[in-house]
Image (spheres, grey):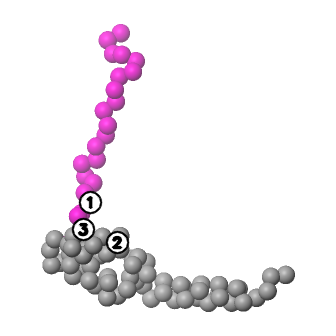
Amino acid sequence: MTTPTLAPVQPKVNAKRFVAPRSEFDQGKYNYRHGIDLATCATDDMTDGWLSCQEAGERFGWQSSPAAKGEDAYWRAMMQQASDREVM
């Protein structure tokens, strides 16, 4: 018996998988959405991304679409209406 029963298994590496890095503009947006200070932006593109998120008022990415803003308004109206009613 030349091979041990508990031989280490070599991990399979997928060399075809490539994850593209974020653009600097997207990194600036990421920084704003995660509460990272504007002073941490290293380039003008990062600063532009940070400031565009601030101007648009989007703290989270899903809030940027008009559909999401409408759904939020609908949910707030339903909660307000539900809180006005008496509980039986």
Judging depth in this view, the residue of 40 and 72 nearest the camera is 40
Residue 75 appears in which quarter of the rendering? Answer: bottom right
Residue 68 at x, y percent in the picture = 48, 83
> What amino acid is labelled 3 in the image?
Arg
Element at label 1? loop
Q: In the image, what residue occupies the spot 24% across and 68% down? A: 22
Task: Check disc 2 and report the residue beneath it.
Answer: 35
Q: Quadrant of the C terminus?
A: bottom right
Task: Check disc 1 and report the residue beneath it.
Answer: 19
Magenta stretch? 1-26
Q: CA distance from mark 2 to mark 3?
A: 18 Å
> What amino acid is labelled 2 in the image?
Gly
Task: Check disc 3 and report the residue beneath it.
Answer: 22
Residue at the outermost top position: 1
* Left or right, 87 with reference to 37: right
Judging depth in this view, the residue of 21 and 18 nearest the camera is 21
* Magenta part, dominant SS: loop
Residue 74 visible in this rendered orientation of the protein: yes
Residue 24 highlighted magenta (yes or no): yes
